[in-house]
Amino acid sequence: MIVTSRWVILTHVSGFNDFALVCLALGQTQSRLQMAELAGEYLARLDPRDAEIAARFMVGRPLAQGDEKPLQISGRAIWKIVAAMTGGQDHEDQGEAIFAVATDFGEAIEMVLRLRQSEPEVTLTLAEVERCFGEIASIEGRNSRRRKLDALRELFERASALEGKYLTKILIGEMRHGMSEGLMLEAIARMASRPVAEVRRANMLAGDVGRAVRAMRTTAPASADATGAPASELDADAPAASLTTARADDAPAHPRPLKPMLAQPAQNVAEAFRMLGDRLALEHKLDGARVQIHCTGAGVHIFSRALNDVTASLPEVAEIAGRLGSRRAIFDGEVIAIGADGRPLAFQEVMRRFGRVRDIERLRVERPVRLFVFDLIGLDGELLIDAPYEERYTALSELASAAGLAMAARILPSTVAEGSQFYARAIAEGYEGIVAKALAGPYMPGARGRGWVKIKTARTFDLVIVAADWGYGRRHGWLSNYHLAARDERDGGLVEVGKTFKGLTDDDFRAMTERLLAIKTAEARGTVVVRPEVVVEVAYSDIQRSPRYAGGMALRFARIVGVRNDKSAAEADTIATVAAAFDRQMVKPLGADE
Ligand code: AMP
């Protein structure tokens, strides 16, 4: 069947080739409105299952967020496979020439694929591509590397050059057609003729644009359960407000994590009062790793900030949460590592526990961790996200004291001065800072909204490594000088603000070199360009004006203080935050609130 949309001629809507054509058209469209229309119209033509897959692919995500095991396919692996397919010769030497004309890595792969004698017929479907990605992700154990590459080769052998371009873009997570997650939500709203707010909420709850598509296609408007359950399953008698506004999708067999709520930075307590109003709470900011704990009555599941299931790595946390008995609850909290003297250790220490599945019992003794809870997102099968923080907190306190769970210290300050004292004491006691929370604020999954505000003294930014230089002398053979970038919220791009080779140990350099080479997209004159995925916490002495950087600012004496494996590039600090810190340097601090 041939369907002519306003922009693209679709011959086989569930085919991967049609998906690639739609992406191509998106890349040629400047207007956000038109992009949302085009993608929405395309998604509407697909059956619900294919629409779910296409929505994910379109934002550069091979598999559903949350259940996703990493595919562990680097740009370099794709390049090698494709080069070997095109006549057996290695195109390494042609690489630079191709990269010089290609606008991105996907296009470079397309150009190499065009060197084949003939193009395969286009037969790949969206479902087949997804299945193949799933298989690659699940390959483990003996010879897993070779088996993964074999599966990848089979996929590319069936792909046309254009399809190869988009397979590559999805695999490396860089679509470069400007379809951000926010814009995708607008497209889904058009697909389903539903308000964007409803789609946004479905996405927050489901934690994945594909599942948001499914929810929009399988539930009735507005009254529906945004997590994807058919409307008929909803509790029609649920009170409309307060603690019971939505059903939690935490059925014992398969709890699904929600995106954690994020905090925006403020300079001091006075600014937090200005941002949130004066009905706020201040809590200690614990320097650990975020966890979301789902107690299902039948068991416990612990999810990391990146929504990975880390239950097996943290048995002591699982035990604590198990004290709730048959009660169902979803906690938000922080896990910190404890040193031999009982004092908290640096964030890096706790991260060493995450994702580890071997030697757990030994690690548990050597590097114990402690859980602090600070929010309650679900209780007895109901989601509490619409309830005000003060109500959630009351319910949390009751549960925590019944189950003996530790909570972050907090106060309800009535004046800025009182809040500033709490902050000063927190810093003196060795905390990273404090988090201010509006008492009336809802829980906003995934949103750096107006609800939470973090205040910390440390001069650090979370920045993305976008490239690295090969080292010389003692650092020969390592990628050791890292190019650091902040996010530009206006266009979703990244703006470099400095470079550093300081702060890492030799072991860290080795590991980082390996990691960056796996996500390399190009190399020229001793500099390796990488997919912007690795986030590092960077300390600096001050910020100076610099015409050498596009943002006009550079960090002085930058030093990496930690690798933030728990954060994605989308959570890095923004260039606006760097600019605000720069402006503050110019203004003498007023003192009282510092
Ligand atoms: P940042 O990582 O600098 O963006 O700060 C936000 C993080 O602080 C959250 O993601 C939590 O992991 C952590 N955090 C520590 N203590 C608290 C708290 N009391 N409330 C909320 N977040 C906290």
Image (tube, rainbow, N blue to C red):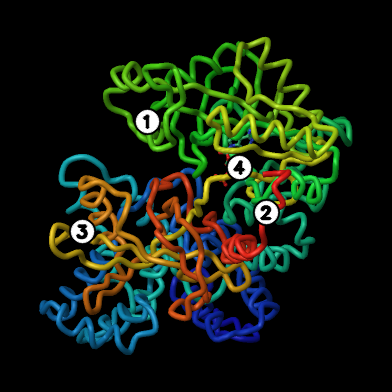
Amino acid carrying label 2: it is Pro
- Mark 1 or mark 2: name the one nearer the start of the chain: 1
Amino acid carrying label 3: it is Asp
- Disc assigned to residue 353: 1
Vertical position of residue 93 compared to residue 259: above or below: below
From the image, state whether disc 2 or disc 3 is nearer to you.
2
Element on which disc 2 rests: loop
From the image, state whether disc 3 or disc 4 is nearer to you.
4
Residue at screen point 49% across, 20% down = 318
Amino acid carrying label 1: it is Arg
Q: Which of the 4 image quadrants contains residue 196?
A: bottom right
Vertical position of residue 341 compared to residue 462: above or below: above
Residue 227: image location, x then y, percent:
67, 43
Element on which disc 1 rests: loop
From the image, state whether disc 2 or disc 4 is nearer to you.
2
Ligand 1 quadrant in view = top right
Residue 126 or 378: which is nearer the viewer?
378
Q: Are marks 2 and 4 in contact (CB under 8 Å)?
A: no
Q: Which of the 4 image quadrants contains residue 198?
A: bottom right
371 relative to 414 in the view: left or right: left
Residue 66: image location, x then y, percent:
50, 44
- Disc assigned to residue 589: 2
Please name the residue that numbered disc 4 is placed on.
Answer: 260
